[in-house]
Image (cartoon, coloured by chain):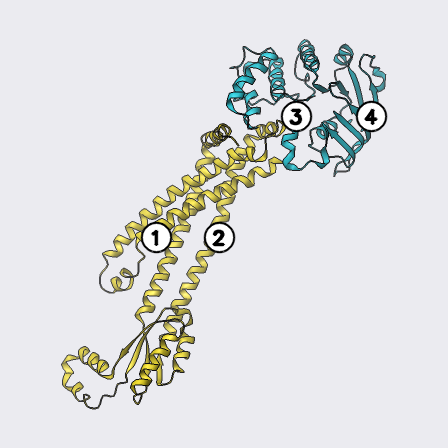
Amino acid sequence: MNSSSMRYLSAQGLHNLARNRLMTLAGIGVLTACLVITGVATLFAANVNSLVAYLGSQNETVVYLDPAADDTTTQNAYTAIMAVPGVKSATYVSKQDVLDEYKSYMEEYADLWDEFQNDNPFKANYSVVVDDLDNMQTIQAQLETIPGVVKVSAPVEMTSIFVKVQHVVTTAGYVLVAVLAVVSIVVISNTIRLSVYARRKEINIMKYVGATNAFIRWPFFVEGVGVGLIAAVLATGIVLGAYYGLTNAAGTLTGFWQTLLGDSVVPLSKVWYWIAGGFLLGGGVIGGLGSVMSVRRHLDV
Amino acid sequence: MITFDHVSKTYPSGNHALEDLSLTIDKGEFVFVLGKSGAGKSTFLKMILREEIPTEGTVTVAGHDVAKLRKSEIPYFRRQMGVVFQDFRLIPTLTAYDNVAFAMRVTNVPEKKIKERVPYVLELVGLGDKCGSYPEELSGGEQQRVALARALVHTPQLIIADEPTGNIDPELSFEMMELLTAINSVGITIVVVTHEHQLVHRFRQRVITIDHGHLLSDTPAGEDFKEAVLK
């Protein structure tokens, strides 16, 4: 396709956008709505993932060591713990550290705790951070088999709930995105179909004068991609604008809510390019696919 | 130029449009195709344009067996011929110039060549002064001449006219036929499907009649066409 033909056909596509004003607006409106819902679902899923990861990191697994374990056993236990897949870090906490921690919790009973200075009943342990919450139960079982380990205390039930919530949200997000993508393609396809119907005579003439299918498709492709990109820009503005407001509001939270949400909210700076890029790519691809699907039927002349 | 060799066409509905039709149209010939409604004339034209392929037999146009053309080859095959329709098929939102230029623009012709060629062909069909007119500002005869200019713009070897005078006044019909005769005189093959016997008698070109999908008669140019064959 030479440049003058490309310019002519692209101009025809843009001209169609203006000519079929109402349908173009309807197409842009519906596609924008679909993209906004997709964006909200994606950000929601990203934040649930972030929250689950945050809560997981706050619930440490404690690996208690045998009080009779010598230094070598303790050191070997560390190596074995770190070798378990899914373990991110392990920090040694001595018997004295545990006693000091309890003392700091209840300073008014410091004298009482002093009784334990010579007969410390606590066990030395490793405080383990797990970054594979899906396999918490397996990790716990593996940790229990390590020589020198007497008990493993892991927040298996709590983690299991988080992980289930995470899976439900992620799956629902995927389903929603897939359904909305199909809906969007159908909407764009119908918008372009009306444009194709209005220009069926031109398509027919094009076929008889020897235009190739690529030439015939191009103006409709430009029209579809145009609708998709306009909707993408609008949806990006709406979603990122609203998210900016939400993240700002989260920053003003205090107390429990600040601890729970404030620290786990995915910052705008980490998601804006994914949302904008995803919308532009998604809008363009959906617009292009929808238009190609509508023209295909008219090409068999 | 065109050869139908024992061609039959049966549509999926079971309609036998053509049955064992054999004929040859040589390069540079002017041929009228006559037949009643439903005789098979449209299918005959669709085969030449490679809109349809035969169920049996072979159709060869400009050296191409139409059934063997790949889909990607069809547009280039069609650029060797020009088509004129009864209803003109002009784009109402484009001027006469742009309607003709449209055929070149959608076939990848550079704008410089379009600017040279379009005024020339419009002049050729007598519409040099109507370049800027829209179809609705033109008479039926003028619109058909724009359609003819569009058919001529690719310098085709063959022009197919499907009832080209069906929507224009009788006197303009003669003008259109004279124009086609002039085009034929430079060696372009012309196939005109018509039902206007007056034109056929007046121009004394070769006349092929089709009836119920069969070749009913084939009257050579210069001989009197006997209407009795159609009755």
How far apart are labels 2 and 4 at the CA level? 58 Å
Residue B118 seen in this snapshot:
yes
Please provide percent x and percent y for residue A73.
Answer: 33, 85
Displayed quadrant of residue A300: top right
Q: What residue is pinned by disc 2?
A: A178
Q: Residue furthest front?
A: A72
Indicate which disc, 4 or 3, sits on the residue closer to the N terminus. 3
State the hue of chain A: yellow
What is the tally of numbered marks visible in this picture? 4
Q: What residue is pinned by disc 1?
A: A271
Q: Secondary structure at mark 4?
A: strand
Subunit of label 1: A
Q: Are marks 3 and 1 on the same chain?
A: no
Closer to us: A213 or B209: A213
Amino acid type of the residue tagged 1 in the rendering:
Val
Amino acid type of the residue tagged 4 in the rendering:
Leu
Within 10 Å of the Cα at label 2, are there few (<14), some (14-19), or many (20+) other Cα atoms? few
Of the residues tagged 2 and 4, which is closer to the observer?
Answer: 4
Q: Is residue A49 above or below residue B135?
A: below
Q: Secondary structure at mark 3?
A: loop
Q: Residue furthest top?
A: B171
Q: Are marks 4 and 3 on the same chain?
A: yes
Amino acid type of the residue tagged 3 in the rendering:
Gln
Amino acid type of the residue tagged 2 in the rendering:
Ala
Residue A300 seen in this snapshot:
no
Q: What residue is pinned by disc 4?
A: B215
Residue depicted at x 80% and y 14% = B221
Q: Secondary structure at mark 2?
A: helix
Query: Is A102 on the left-hand or right-hand side of B9?
Result: left
Residue depicted at x 32% and y 67% = A55
Q: What residue is pinned by disc 3?
A: B80
Indicate which disc, 2 or 1, sits on the residue closer to the N terminus. 2
